[in-house]
Image (cartoon, helix red, strand yellow):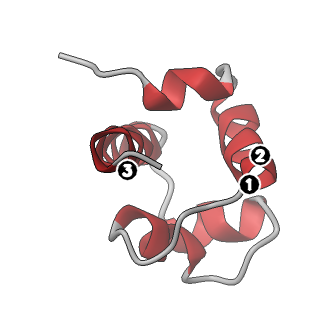
Amino acid sequence: MNEDILNIFRHNLERLRKRYGCSCKQLSELIGCDSSYISKVENGRIIPPLDKIIAIADFFEIEFIDLFKKTN
């Protein structure tokens, strides 16, 4: 995956998570992952597979593609 797209994804994930008042641990557990999963994603240590990206988008009630759109 393109590094710029990954950076946009990580930024959007963190922004949305904070807007919803959700910790990394809480979101990780809500999508069925170990407690440090979202932290690892936001820090660029892992790239989530499509099923996890969709689970994240479903949690935020957005289309998964919106996680990859650049925001101002």
Query: Residue 65: image x %, image y %?
Result: 59, 23
Residue drawn at 46 percent across, 30 percent down: 68
Task: Left or right? Give the position of 17 relative to 3.
Answer: right
Label total for image = 3
* SS state under label 1: helix
Q: Which residue is drawn at 48% across and 49% down?
A: 1
Residue 52, numbered label = 1
Q: Is 41 situated left or right of 54 in this image?
A: left
Q: Is mark 2 on a helix, strand or loop?
A: helix
Front-lying residue, 50 or 10 = 50
Expressed as whole percent of the image width and height from the top left, the position of residue 40 reads: 45, 76
Q: Earlier in the sequence, mark 1 or mark 3?
A: 3
Mark 1 and mark 2 in contact? Answer it, CB < 8 Å. yes
Could you say which disc has been placed on residue 55 in the image?
A: 2
Look at label 1 and name its amino acid.
Lys
Q: State whether residue 30 is above or below residue 65.
A: below
Which amino acid type corresponds to the residue marked 2 in the rendered image?
Ala
Task: State the CA–CA distance, disc 1 to disc 3.
Answer: 13 Å
Closer to the camera in the image, 22 or 61: 61
**Measured from the top left, where is residue 43 in percent x and y?**
33, 70
Q: Is residue 4 above or below residue 68?
A: below
For the residue carrying disc 2, how many other residues have a C-alpha within 10 Å: few (<14), some (14-19), or many (20+)? some
Sequence-first tag of 2 and 3? 3
Task: Please state if 8 lies on the left or on the right of 36 as rendered.
Answer: left
Disc marking residue 36 = none
Label 2 – label 3 distance at C-alpha: 15 Å
Q: Which residue is drawn at 43% across and 37% down?
A: 16
